[in-house]
Image (cartoon, helix red, strand yellow):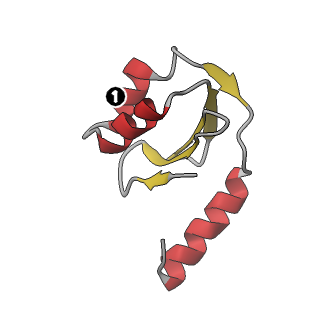
Amino acid sequence: MPIKEFKSGYIREADYDATEKQLDLMFENKTVLAYKGVPNWIFEKLSQDPSPKSFWEDNIRDEFSSAQPRKNNSSTSAKKQLNDLFGGN
């Protein structure tokens, strides 16, 4: 499962499951939205786009069905806090 972390901006993390074709996005306010039926190329484009928020608004938000996020956003937050404290990816 590829994960792309964004150091700043509205979207902070994109977590993609190619098997399930599910994209989970974590936003700066710790909200997690999930989308199903997302092809790999969409994740790749989002990961490389200079404005992930605009890419999400134009290509993902209204184009794909909502899904249940695969992981709890509190566990992601805890992981981030540990990585921020001790370093790591």
- Going by the image, does 76 lie left or right of 11? right
Frontmost residue, 37 versus 19: 19
Q: Residue at 71% of width from left, 28% of height from top?
A: 67
On the image, numbered disc 1 is attached to which residue?
Answer: 54
How many numbered discs sit on the rendered protein?
1
Tag 1's secondary structure?
helix
Q: Is residue 49 left or right of residue 65?
A: left
Q: Quadrant of residue 32?
A: top right
Residue 44 picture location, percent across and down: 39, 39
Rendered location of residue 9, percent (x, y): 36, 46
- The residue furthest top is 63
What residue appears at the point 52 percent right and 85 percent down from the top-left corner? 86
Q: Is residue 75 above or below residue 10?
A: below
Tell which residue pokes out farthest to the left in this image: 50
Judge from the rendering whether residue 88 lies leftward or rightward of residue 66; answer left or right.
left
Q: What is the quadrant of residue 69 in the picture?
A: top right
Residue drawn at x 55%, y 27% is 38
- Expressed as whole percent of the image width and height from the top left, the position of residue 42 reads 43, 30
Q: Is residue 7 above or below residue 43?
A: below
Q: Estimate the x, y position of residue 19 in percent, counting from the top left.
A: 65, 39
Task: Pick whichever, 6 or 15, lies toward us.
Answer: 15
Along the line of sight, which residue is nearer the eye, 69 or 36? Answer: 36
Going by the numbered disc 1, the residue's amino acid type is: Ser
Residue occupying image coordinates x 42% and y 28%: 56
Circle 1 packing at 10 Å, graded few (<14), some (14-19), many (20+), is some
